[in-house]
Amino acid sequence: MGTSTGSNDYSASNLLANITKQQYANYQSMYQPIENQQIAFATDPNQPMAAAQRAGAQAGNAFQAQQQGLTKQLQGQGIALTPTMKASMDRKNQVAKSLATDSAMNHAAQSTYDTQTSVLTGAPSSTAIGNPATISQTL
């Protein structure tokens, strides 16, 4: 019987070393790029503002679609608003749109900030501590 040579060494420590090397190579090719993306997201100070802007735009689009639907509904029913009624309805809709847009922007910014904090600290976002100024204060 012979002894093991370097190329055919199947000792437990060499097998473990080879498995560890393979696992690390798998980590580098599979998980490290995802971690790098998460780190880039979590450390980007522009992410909360970008999320807020997207949410504000979506809320504005929703109100515009709702307003168009209401106008078509009134026309379909043969209802014509007086200029005073239209102005009153427009003011009411503008206030509601502003409130909804600000709320959507604040929630999106806070949620993004919480997610960033969670990624960086490993804490669940519901327990993240710290809060930058709300987005409407920075606009």
Image (tube, rainbow, N blue to C red):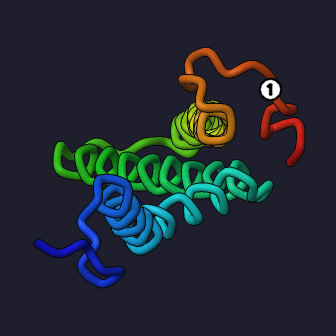
The kind of residue tagged 1 is Asn
Residue 36: x %, y % from top left: 59, 64
Q: Which residue is mark 1?
A: 131
Q: Is residue 33 left or right of residue 121?
A: left
Using the image as rendered, state which of residue 53 and residue 24 is in the foreground.
24
- The mark total stands at 1
* Viewport quadrant of the N terminus: bottom left
Q: Secondary structure at mark 1?
A: loop
Q: Where on the picture, by quarter, is residue 135?
A: top right
**Which residue does the image show at 34% across and 68% down from the upper left?**
22
> How busy is the neighbourhood of tag 1: few (under 14 within 10 Å), some, or many (20 plus)?
few
Q: Residue furthest left?
A: 1
**Which residue does the image show at 34% across and 50% down from the upper left?**
71
Q: Is residue 108 left or right of residue 79?
A: right
Residue 49: x %, y % from top left: 73, 53
Using the image as rendered, state which of residue 87 and residue 7 is in the foreground.
7
Q: Residue furthest bottom?
A: 7
Question: Is residue 84 in view from this perspective?
Answer: no
Using the image as rendered, state which of residue 98 and residue 73 is in the foreground.
98
Residue 132: x %, y % from top left: 84, 32
Q: Is residue 109 left or right of residue 131?
A: left
Residue 83: x %, y % from top left: 56, 45
Using the image as rendered, state which of residue 123 and residue 138 is in the foreground.
123
Q: Where on the picture, by quarter, is residue 13?
A: bottom left
Q: Residue furthest front?
A: 1
Q: Is the residue 29 above or below the residue 16 in the image? A: below
**Which residue does the image show at 23% across and 46% down from the upper left?**
73
**Which residue does the image show at 44% across and 64% down from the upper left?**
24
Question: Is residue 136 in view from this perspective?
Answer: yes
Q: Is the residue 112 above or below the residue 118 in the image? A: below
